[in-house]
Each structure stands twice: as structure tokens, then as C-alpha cells.
Image: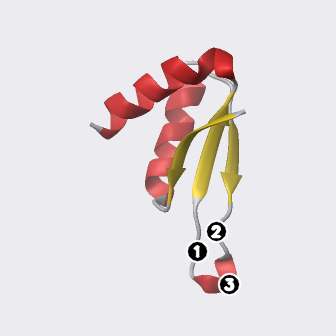
Amino acid sequence: MILVLDTINLILFEEIKALLKSVEIPFVAKNNASSMFNNFGNYEIYVTSEFETSAKELINNAIG
């Protein structure tokens, strides 16, 4: 699995998950934020190498 998004922004994380799902790119999302510390931590999205290029392009276009 290849990391395509690593962010501390929960809203961005949720938007990218929805975007990947809408174009049917399979992914694994990891929430490493700790609710004990006001959600301090990061959010990660992984895809297989087969989808790496298309996922990165979509994310870059979405972020701007």
C-alpha cells in the first residue's frame, strides 16, 4: 500500500475519501488522531500501486 495523503485536516481527509469512493478507487483510511488530545494526530489514505498515479492526480486537483 502506498501513502497518498497524510494530513491533520479532518475535513480534507473526509473529502478525499468521498472523492476516491466516487471514482471507485479502492483505498485504506487510517485515523491516527487521538480523541484524548483534541484529535491531535494525523489522517492517512493508502492505495495500491495500481491506483497510485490516478489517486495522486485526483488529490492534487482537489487540493489545488
Disc 2/disc 1 C-alpha distance (Å): 5 Å
Q: In this figure, which colouring scheme has been used for the structure?
A: secondary structure
Q: Quadrant of the N terminus?
A: top right
**Whole-percent x, y for residue 44 in the image:** 61, 49
- Residue at numbered disc 3: 36
Amino acid type assigned to the residue bearing label 1 in the image: Asn
Determine which residue is flagged by label 2: 33
Q: How many marks?
A: 3
Label 1 crowding class (10 Å Cα cut-off): few <14, some 14-19, many 20+?
some
The answer to which of marks 2 and 1 sits earlier in the sequence is 2
- Picture layout, residue 22 above or below residue 10: above
Could you tell me which quadrant the C terminus lies in? Answer: top left
Q: Is residue 12 above or below residue 27?
A: below
| Residue nearer the viewer, 6 or 63 | 6
| Circle 3 Cα neighbour tier, 10 Å, few/some/many (<14 / 14–19 / ≥20) | few
Q: Do residues under tags 2 and 1 come within 8 Å of each other at their CB atoms?
A: yes
